[in-house]
Image (spheres, helix red, strand yellow):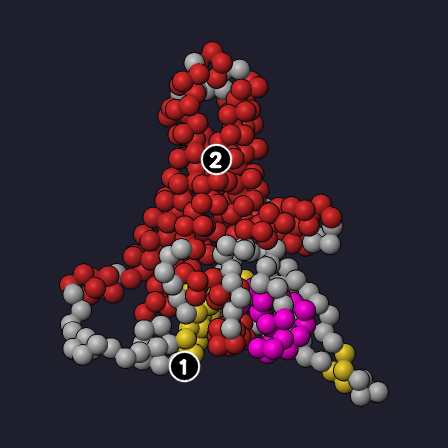
Amino acid sequence: MSESVNTNNNQQIKPEPKKTTIGGQALIEGIMMVGPTRTCMAVRKGDGTIHVEEMQQSERVTFYEKVPFIRGCIRFYKMLVRGTDALMKSADLSEQGAPQPEGEADKKPSALDQYLTKHYNVMVTLSAILGILLSVGLFILLPWLIVFLATKLMGSALADETWMKVVLNLAEGVLRMVIFFLYLRFASKIEGIDRVWRYHGAEHKTIACYEAGEPLTVENILKHSRFHPRCGTSFMFLVLAISILIYTVAGIIIGDGRFIVNILIRLLMIPVICGVSFEILRFVGRHDKNPVCRGLSKPGLWLQKFTTAEPDAPIVEVAIAAMQAVIPENADEDVW
């Protein structure tokens, strides 16, 4: 982070605000921050101390990670695997040092625990893939299946009309949004999830404080908003919104109502939807002063009411530890 410097008049010059590429993810009693050259996680352990750990990050950036409309899918998958890894580690770290019930400390790990520890990387990858499959099934295939069954009740002649295809795809999109909203609402009711939402809020506030060029102190960070336009929640909203347009156009062009063909269309279009959504998020993030871009970001910001919460000072301290570990020496390396 750029430091204030003294002028000849002994006045301090405040660093210029900027938009950073540094992003993060809330963990179990912790936060992972991803910088341009380092990825680190900070977790509040059971004994109250903050554990900071650098996670392996490939220094080699492939050609495809720089290609517009392709890089979004690659970065999303990498972030998902890295985030799953950090989440599992944080669950273990958050319990370290905490008082254990009598006899627990001497308890030997089960054969399954030993196997999973030995094949940890495989387990992380499989967990990430399972997460993708569940998301596709819940937010992509389930809404379509409901609409598909509804078309069987109205007859094929009416369903094949171009205007009706548009209506059905719009209905599918609305249903997809509703399922996503209900998912967030139910997730908020899970015991302990409020702590994760607080860490998510601390992540946003810390990044906002850094982007404002202010020193990373608890007092400074708590002043900032917990809502941030370049958040994963906003990205998910864009994915769902863009899917309405792309699936509608694909349905009109291809015009095939067969069950298998429709499933294949939706699966094959997912990388396209992710790629387009990523580029829109980047554009909106760079032009957040534009009224149109501000309008596009508002739904995602509103949804963050359900995925973030106001943090307290100890949570912000963890966010600071994670952020400071990834800030590059060259202030231009992380410019959005």
Q: Which residue is drawn at 45% across and 50% down?
A: 185
Give the Cα distance between marks 1 and 2.
45 Å
| Residue 43 position within the rendered picture, expressed as x and y whole percent measured from the top left | 42, 73
Marks 1 and 2, the one that precedes in the sequence: 1
**Which kind of residue does numbered mark 2 sit on?**
Leu
Q: What element carries label 1?
A: loop
Q: Residue 49 carries which label?
A: 1
| Residue 281 position within the rendered picture, expressed as x and y whole percent measured from the top left | 60, 49
Does residue 293 sit above or below 200 in this rendering?
Answer: above
| Residue 186 position within the rendered picture, expressed as x and y whole percent measured from the top left | 41, 50
Q: Does the magenta stretch include residue 139?
A: no
Q: Which mark is residue 175?
A: 2
Quadrant into which the C terminus falls: bottom right
> Which corner quadrant of the image does residue 248 belong to?
top right
| Residue 94 position within the rendered picture, expressed as x and y whole percent measured from the top left | 35, 72
Quadrant into which the N terminus falls: bottom right
Are the residues tagged 1 and 2 within 8 Å (C-beta)?
no
The magenta span reads: 202-223
Does residue 248 sit above or below 89 in this rendering?
Answer: above
Which label sits in the foreground, 1 or 2? 2
State whether residue 22 appears in this view: no
Task: Please identify the dominant SS of the magenta region.
Answer: helix
Q: Is residue 186 left or right of residue 286?
A: left
In the image shown, does 143 or 25 lie closer to the viewer?
143
State whether residue 222 appears in this view: yes
> Which corner quadrant of the image does residue 42 belong to?
bottom left
Does residue 292 sit above or below 159 in this rendering?
Answer: below
In the image shown, does 48 or 264 lie closer to the viewer?
48
